[in-house]
Structures are given as structure tokens and as C-alpha cells.
Image (cartoon, helix red, strand yellow):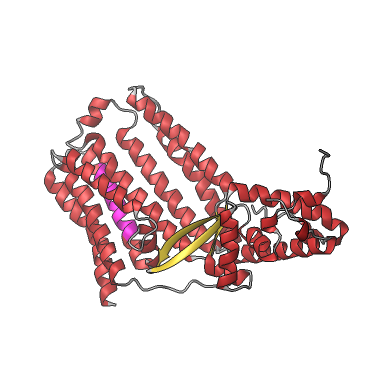
Amino acid sequence: MTERHHPRHGLDDALLTPLRFSLMAAVGPDAEIDFATLRDLLETDDSALSKAIATLNAVGYVGVRKGYVANRPRTWLRATHGGRAAMRVHVAALQAIAGGLTTSAASESPRQVG
Amino acid sequence: MSPTDGQRIDAAGAAHLLEAGAAASARADAAVDHRVLARTQFGIAAAMFIYLSVFLLLFGNQTQEAVSGAGPGGYAYGTMLLIPFLVLTQLVMGVRDRVGVVRAHRPYLVSALIGLIPFLLLAGLSVLDVSYPWGLNLVAAAAPAVPLAGLGLKAARRAGPRSRPVAPIEPGRPARIMTASLGLYLGLTGMLATFSWSALTGLALVIGLVILLALISSRWGLPSLGAVWGSREWAAYGTSFTLLVTLAVVLARTPWNTPLVGVVGGLIVAAPLVVAAVRGARS
């Protein structure tokens, strides 16, 4: 079996759609974001976001926490350890594929906030 | 999960994804409410310092006989310190839950956990009846609180005008009932500590606490209550917290560890939260 060098092998199917990738970028390594805020940040709708979360949750990339605020149910999302690791590999592969096409801001790995 | 052949991506597609991710990341950054983060971190840091320092003041650097002989409570007075602190940690979770985006800041939290080591060491020395300089109590209490306060300071420096102000929520009837019940629970914690059967009631109170903490994700949980509290309820909780800790010190370290002092003290501890709940109903 030959060794696989092409950066596309580092890509992750679960992170290939803009919505799922943006979701993982938004939660980053250390944030917890509630569903409604995430929907507004990603400029999407409830249904599309629910599907994206279900996919990422199924592969173990996001953790879901449920609770209540003022008697109303709320859902919060955060990246799991596996999700953070997968994101690092995926971003590195995207950067390798994109080569010189990305701006410096866009090519940064998702947030390392101090 | 590896990509299928049908989902190959070219350079432009990769650049597009990276740009979308960077934009989402920047928007999430902008949505962080550093003001709330700063308040909650300062609150937890202060509560942790009070809890650890008073705990060591009561139980550290003295023989087990001295602690056990301090009154019917003995080591059980520790429950009076632990309960309001654990309750506070979950109430604060509710405040953080109200804002859309919160940060974990792992290095600070790890530092706070490591900072608990001096406290555990001093607790171990006390159990072994080994004496140490009194000032170490304050150092051990400050060790985990300082990283948390540092995190609060960092958040406070980044706090700017709110882009998405959090609308106030008026506590409803269930929240007011919970607030009053919490006040009575804290009051009972102080009230029952002076009786000879305080070990039994202490156990019952701890079981009650475990049940309360286990409701974390339900509408009856403490985070849900903390989320709807306004400044009146928070001021009341701060007062009850301080009064209960003070009562623990009085009962454990003075001759006034009588049931009468416990009962009166417990009523005073309960009063602020009960009054806040009643005033909330009238306003």
C-alpha cells in the first residue's frame, strides 16, 4: 500500500460543508454557544442548524448540553476533544490545498483566544 | 471520517471554507459578553477565598479534639460552609447561561485546580495534628482564588459596550418559591447545626443538596434560578451567604454555640432571600 501524501486525505467529510465547518470554527477550542446565538451567528435557520449539529454530534465532534433559562428549554454546544483534534487536521489540510489563495486572517486555524 | 471521492475540494473551495470559518470565529468572539464573565469570575473567586479561608480558620492548625470539642457540630460545621458555596457555583452557571457565548479558559481553570493543592496539604497536616504558621491558611485560600480573579480581571479589561444587551427577566412564581425555599434551606443549615443530633440533620441537608445539584438541567435546577435573578436576589444571596459563614464561625469558635443562637442565627440567614422573594411578588 502506498503512503498517502495529498492534503485531501486530511480532509474530514463531516467538516466539508460550510455550515458544519463554520459551526466548529465558531465554538472553537473553548467556547460554549447556545443554539439561538449560533443560528444568528451562522446566519442560518433552525432546521439546517439542527441537521448540522446532529451530524457533528453523531461523529462525536460536538457535545450538547440542555437546560432551562427562565422556564424555557435551551441547548448549548461545545467542541469535544475529538472535534478539536479533527478540526486542527482539517484546517491544516484546507490550508495546504488552498495554498496561496487564502488571506492571512482566513488561513489562521480557528481561534486561539487568550 | 475521510472525504469521499465525490467531495474533493479545490483550492478555491478550500479558501472559501477557511474564510467562512474565520468569519464565524470572529463573530463568535464579538458576541462574548466579557462583562458578565468578569462578574461571575470575581464572584466565584471571592466565594472560594471566603470558603477556604474560613474552613482553615475553623479546622486548620488545631487538634482534632479541639475541633470535635467546639460544640455539637464539630467538623459538621464544615457543611455550613460547603453548602452555600456549592449552591453559588450552580447559581452562577445560570448567569453564564443567559449570555449566548461563554469561554472556558482552560489554563486558568487548571491553575485554580492546581491552586487547591496547598489547601489539601494543610487539611492533611491538620488531620495529622501537625502545626504550621497561621499565615499559610490565607496563602492556601488565595492560591486557587487568584487565578480565578485573574480571569475576571482579564475579562473586565476586554469588556466593552454590550452589542447584544441581555434583557432582564422578572422572576416568576416558581422562581420566587425556589428563592424563598433556598433561603429556608440555608437557614435550616445554620439552625440545626447546634443540636446534639446535628450529624443526622446534617446528613439530611447534604442529601437535599445532592438532589438540588442533580436537578442542574431541569427547570427546577439552580442554574435556571440563577438565570432569572436580578440584583435584589443576588444581594440577598450574598447577605445570606455571609451571614451563614459568620454563624459557622460564631458556633465553632465561641462559647455561643447554643441551640438558641443557632435558631435565631438560622432565621436571620433565611430572612434576606425570603424577603427578596416576597418583595419580588409585590413589585
Tell me the residue at 24%/54% (across/down): B185
Q: Most extreme residue toward the bottom, as rendered?
A: B283
Whether B14 is among the magenta residues is no
Q: Most extreme residue toward the right, as rendered?
A: A100
B188, above or below B170, in the image: above
Judge from the rendering whether residue B76 lies leftward or rightward of residue B50; answer left or right.
Answer: left
Quarter holding the C terminus of chain B? bottom left
Judge from the rendering whether residue B186 lies leftward or rightward of residue B195; answer left or right.
Answer: right
Tell me the residue at 36%/49% (across/down): B86
How many numbered discs?
A: 0
Quadrant of residue B232 in the image? bottom left
Q: Out of B216 and B162, give the one closest to the viewer.
A: B216
**How far from the left and from the top, in percent, is residue B248?**
25, 44
Does the image show residue A84? yes
A9, above or below B114, in the image: below
Q: Out of B169 and B190, give the one closest to the viewer.
A: B169
Whether B243 is among the magenta residues is yes
Judge from the rendering whether residue B31 lies leftward or rightward of residue B144; answer left or right.
Answer: right
**How far from the left and from the top, in percent, is residue B172?**
32, 72
**How far from the left and from the top, in percent, is residue B75?**
26, 35
Judged by its main secondary structure, the magenta piece is helix
Q: Out of B145 and B227, give the one closest to the viewer.
A: B227
Region rendered in magenta: B237-249
Does the image show residue B256? no
Tell me the residue at 55%/46% (across/down): B108
Tell me the residue at 60%/63% (across/down): A52
**How far from the left and from the top, in percent, is residue A15?**
68, 58
